[in-house]
Image: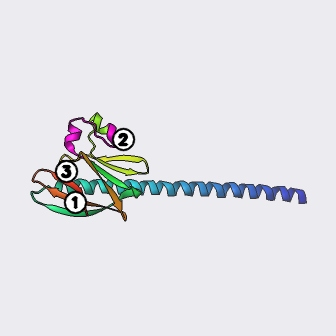
Amino acid sequence: MNNKAQIQQVFTYILTIILVGFVLLMGYRAIIGLIDKGCEVEKASFKTNIESMISKFNNYGSLNREGLNGPCDFSQVCFIDTQIIRSNTAININNPLIFQSTGAGVEKNIFLVKHGLTEPVGFVEQLKVDNSQEYICINNTNGKFEITFRGDGKNTYIEPSE
């Protein structure tokens, strides 16, 4: 009887370990899923905010400085002049995804960059970059992208805030 009780106790421990492992695995997956969904929500919110600001701040002579929360620890936001996208001209930029998308005429002119990962965010027709540049990348400072929006009556020029 003593031998039988020991075997039963071993099976109980094994089942307990399997059950605890399963619960931990499912909990880990749930937490990772929530983090991923939170990041997607942050990116969607950023896209909506940046597109509405570019459209809203195109009035002639308007100058607005805004601090936009950087989604998901992205370190840079890059803007490509709309004329570059329309002309299918590849720009001289070190980021291969942005380089390829501009040369292929993909209608994306806002990109988020972090640790070698580049994600296209959106396309806004009224987006312009200073005449001397084809693109501009703005660094994340303390969790925010500090951006200056300058309107000319038709388009919105993007500049880093100083």
Mark earlier in primary sequence (3, 1): 3
Residue annotated with mark 3: 130
Magenta region: 80-100
The structure residue drawn at horizontal position 81% and vertical position 56%, both measured from the top left corner, is 8
Residue 1 visible to the viewer: no
Q: Quadrant of residue 82?
A: top left
Q: CA distance from mark 3 to mark 1?
A: 12 Å
Residue 146 in the magenta stretch? The answer is no
Left or right of 22: which side holds 110?
left
Give amino acid for label 3: Asp
Residue at position x 53%, y 53% in the image: 29
Name the residue nearer the viewer: 146 or 125: 146
Q: Secondary structure at mark 3?
A: loop
Residue at label 2?
97
Q: Residues within 10 Å of mark 2 (few under 14, many from 20)?
A: some
Density class for disc 1 (Cα within 10 Å; few <14, some 14-19, many ≥20) is some
Marks 3/2: CA–CA distance: 22 Å
Q: Quadrant of the C terminus?
A: bottom left
- Left of 98 or right of it: where is 34? right
